[in-house]
Image: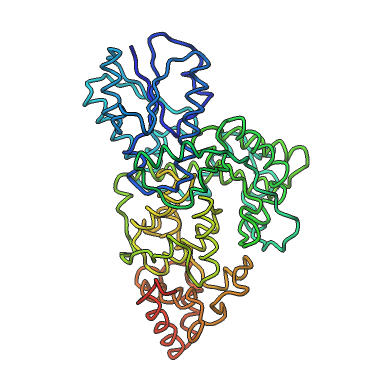
Amino acid sequence: MILRLVLGDQLNAGHSWWREQRDDVLYVMMEIRSETDYAHHHAQKVLALFACMRGFAAAIEAAGHQVRYFRIGDADNGQSFAANLRQVAHSVGATRFERMEADEWRVEQALDAAAAECGLAQTVVGSEHFLVDRSELKTAFAHAVPRMEYFYRDLRQRFGILLANGGEPEGGKWNYDVDNRAKWPGSPAAPAWRWPAHDLSDLWHEIVAAGVVTMGDANEGQVRWPLTRREARAGLAQFVREALPHFGRYQDALTSRSLALFHSLLSFSLNVKMLHPLEVIRAALGAYRRGAVSLESTEGFIRQILGWREFVRGVYWARMPGYGQENALRAVRPLPGWYWSGNTGMACLAHAIGQSLKHAYAHHIQRLMVTGNFALLAGCDPDEVDAWYLGIYVDAFEWVEMPNTRGMSQFADGGVVGSKPYCGAASYISKQGDYCKGCAYDPKRRHGERACPFNSLYWHFHDRHRALLSGNPRLKMPYQLWEKLGAEERHATLQQAEVYLADLDAL
């Protein structure tokens, strides 16, 4: 008998494992405390994952495959990979263990150890999901990580996506990012939240009874995320039809008037593998070929899937486990307590954090330029920032979260992911959205009463990291502007920042 393990983020209905029914194969799936407890996850993340896993297990069993499923509250659940694999192997006399590559380094190590502990011969196969093989990425990214733009161009050519004759980019440009930075004026209207409501209150009672500690709003077990491939595919079609035409132009917009604007909401379905990246890309390409979506919007969306998603995976697997300890800026401050409550006078942070706590979701600019931006400017410990992002978002798995957070957002890797820190003062947030209207702080003031913390913290960040950053050609302008402010203005700004940094919880 062969045991085949299927993890909660490996719900790939197209995997070759499912092409044949075998009497000598038992599929094992498990909800375990070792996976719920390594970080405090959002309640809706745990609910959605467990519900997806249970539905997938039922589907493959209905298709004729043998399944052993451990629920979180089962009396015989050993709550770890090793304990449950040992139990099942003993009960069925299994001598072989097969699994897909785990996406997280931590899980890969745990599964290798579990197989050894159980005395099972192990075979590891690919997840048949990503577009670039992990071994290729580890080799290509091992010494010098390529810039994402050139990595993305290579994949465009490899897969023949948005290319004109001779392999040149369609429209004459590889990247239309400069056309995709508009502030949303409120029209066209943003689509409604596209996922159906699911009553998972019984599952929530199981999770609570099992002692799992979560964060965020459980919403009494009501979850509005896709739980099946059918729902995910329907959501993809709806996104392409209703939101993609406007996605590109407003992808960097910030607003309190819409949860998701024109964003796809597909990252959870992609990251648990209910959707394949190529089917998502082809759906966008189909709309473009039909004339329903502009080239700018199509390219901007495809770049996120084909370029960025594959790129951060390469960074992760080439640099782990050391990448998880990178702290190039030597940031050590704890995250302010309001990251777990949303109770801050800064309207942008109150909204972005409040939305995240309620829905386990925020779009990429809220994550990068609001919550991440503040943590970077304040010098918060990247370990704490990592843990917060990993826990709070429904789509967060370490392979994609860590390079985005520790690398892109916090510059803790010293420039591996991004060539400069991605940060901004209040002017950026005001330019991109409507958060500053009615805020307790004045976005135009660097110091004094009601001065927006983003302003003084922005300049304090650049001043304290001058030795490391001032030679970066992409930061020439900020340092020139800083000098032009004059000694008195610089002193007042830095003093204001010191006041704020002394009590971040009070902001």
Q: How many marks?
A: 0
Query: Closer to the camera, 60 or 399?
Result: 60
Q: Left of 81 or right of it: where is 67?
A: right
Query: Closer to the camera, 156 or 278?
Result: 278
At 48% from the left and 66% from the top, the residue drawn is 423
Residue 255 x, y percent position in the rendering: 63, 62
Q: Residue furthest top?
A: 23
Residue 502, compared with residue 351, is above or below; it is below
- Which color mode does the image show? rainbow
Q: Residue furthest right?
A: 291
Residue 128 x, y percent position in the rendering: 48, 27
Residue 248 x, y percent position in the rendering: 66, 52
Residue 464: quadrant of the picture:
bottom left
At 49% from the left and 52% from the top, the residue drawn is 217
Query: Closer to the camera, 347 or 421?
Result: 347
Residue 474, compared with residue 399, is above or below; it is below
Dividing the image into 4 quarters, which one contains the C terminus? bottom left
Q: Left of 499 or right of it: where is 56?
A: right
Residue 331: quadrant of the picture:
bottom left
At 45% from the left and 51% from the top, the residue drawn is 392
Dividing the image into 4 quarters, which one contains the N terminus? top left
Residue 411 x, y percent position in the rendering: 40, 60
Residue 284: quadrant of the picture:
top right
